[in-house]
Amino acid sequence: MSRKIELTIKSCQKYPDDGRVEEINSSTEGLIYRKNRLHYLVYNDYSAGLSGVRTTIKIDQACERVLIIRAKPYEYQQTFVNGKKEKGSYQTNYGRIKTAVLTEELKIDLRDKKGSILIDYKLYFNGQYTSRNNLLINWV
């Protein structure tokens, strides 16, 4: 059984080349449900020009693993595991980019009526270190 939730998403990217920092804050409605001991957040992402792309976050608290999946046209799939470098991919208008993340901190807080995910990670595009990112997702 799913339930409606309000999500707030805060993302911060720090670029090593020029020291530039970009912050994106957004709020949206979504759903949360549990299936086979995993929790799923599903929402339409309107941040950074994504124009309502369906996004699913699969939370495996027991294994301390989070998987973020975005649907077409901006397909994205990335796994986050504390202390590990995980490969992923991102579809752009110019083709598919190989991604990888080195997760330096992953905190999952699941409660009855609310929760949060904090992910601090280094992002790599096509093998090159691109940015240091911090993603905080809260829901009620």
Image: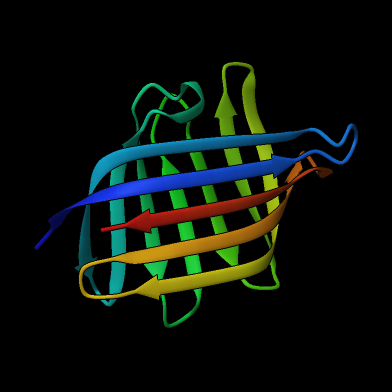
Residue displayed at 56% across by 29% down: 91
- In the rendered image, residue 46, in percent from the top left (x then y), is placed at 39, 28
Q: Is residue 122 above or below residue 109?
A: above
Q: How is the image coloured?
A: rainbow
**Foreground of the two, 139 or 73:** 139
- In the rendered image, residue 19, in percent from the top left (x then y), is placed at 86, 37
- In the rendered image, residue 70, in percent from the top left (x then y), is placed at 42, 39
Residue displayed at 28% across by 77% down: 37
- In the rendered image, residue 51, in percent from the top left (x then y), is placed at 38, 21
**Foreground of the two, 107 or 97:** 107
Quarter of the image with the C terminus is bottom left
Quarter of the image with the N terminus is bottom left
Q: Is residue 5 left or right of residue 61?
A: left
The residue furthest top is: 93
The residue furthest left is: 1
Classify residue 35 by image quadrant: bottom left
Residue displayed at 51% across by 39% down: 76
Q: Is residue 137 left or right of residue 33?
A: right
Classify residue 139 by image quadrant: bottom left
Residue displayed at 58% across by 23% down: 92
> So how many labels did they put on this image?
0
**Foreground of the two, 17 or 93:** 17
Q: Is residue 29 left or right of residue 81?
A: left
The residue furthest bottom is: 62
